[in-house]
Image: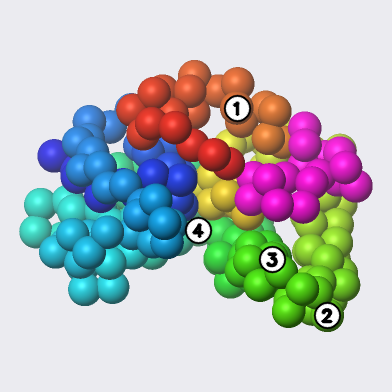
Amino acid sequence: MIEVHHLNNSRSQRILWLLEELELPYEIVHYQRDATTNLAPESLKKIHPLGKSPVVKDGETVVIESGAILEYLVGKYGNGRLAPSASSPDYVRYLQFLHYAEGSAILPVMLRLYVGRLGEAGAPLAPRIASEIETHMGWLDSELAGRTWFVGDALTAADIQLSFAIQATRLLYGLGHFPNLERFLQQIHQRPAYKRSLERGGPYAF
């Protein structure tokens, strides 16, 4: 049985969604953020020393990092679903978006979150951070022009991986300039598997 160590309001929600799309049985070990610091509890370090979520345990195999978890689960259990084949013309585009989500897209959004907590001390950085968000989300928005999904004609793990950065942008910055990204979120939020993942994962601020 696959075991997901799931922190509330975190990237691990994507893993639950993926597992629901693949219709795989899984168990959730729930963790709650500290109400004051918003950090993960120390107990999460029992499964992995970094104390970060998501962590997936599949038998004796423990996998961290959302992108690695998605690749592992799709590769082992996907049976051709949620990823193009390595011989497909779409495969490089798939890999690009799968890794871009956490490699570049999320950085200015997280900076917006952390610098915002500094109040006036962080104000000088705000214009540069906003510019970076506009650049990255503007590019993603343009990549969805005339498309339903980021890769090919069906949902892939790349869409699932990108969802958190786009959701976080909507929460912390807004998607008023990015209508295609807003449409993207609306369509994923209507998917039965996504709804099931929320029912199992619990409240999700993003």
Q: Is disc 4 in contact with disc 2, using a CB cutoff of under 8 Å?
A: no
Q: Which residue is more in the foreground, 146 or 48?
A: 48
Structural distance between the alpha carbons of marks 3 and 2 = 11 Å
Q: Which mark is drawn over residue 198?
A: none
Q: Is residue 88 magenta?
A: no
Q: Name the residue beneath numbered marker 3.
A: 116
Left or right: 14, with 58 as reference point: right
Structural distance between the alpha carbons of marks 1 and 3 = 27 Å
User: In the figure, 63 relative to 49: above or below?
Assistant: above
Which badge, 1 or 2, is on the more N-terminal residue?
A: 2
Left or right: 4, with 67 as reference point: left
Structural distance between the alpha carbons of marks 1 and 2 = 35 Å
Taking the spot 30% from the left edge, 43% from the top edge, the residue there is 77
User: In the figure, 105 relative to 204: above or below?
Assistant: below
Q: Name the residue beneath numbered marker 2.
A: 124
Taking the spot 27% from the left edge, 47% from the top edge, the residue there is 31
Structural distance between the alpha carbons of marks 4 and 1 = 28 Å
Q: Name the residue beneath numbered marker 4.
A: 86
Q: Name the residue beneath numbered marker 1.
A: 189
Taking the spot 41% from the left edge, 56% from the top edge, the residue there is 36
Task: Identify residue type, mark 3.
Answer: Gly
Which badge, 3 or 2, is on the more N-terminal residue?
A: 3
Graded by Cα atoms within 10 Å as few (under 14), some (14 to 19) or many (20 or more), the crowding at tag 1 reads: few
Asked which quadrant contains residue 120, the reply is: bottom right
Structural distance between the alpha carbons of marks 4 and 2 = 45 Å
For mark 1, give the secondary structure: helix
Task: Identify residue type, mark 1.
Answer: His
Q: Quadrant of the N terminus?
A: top left
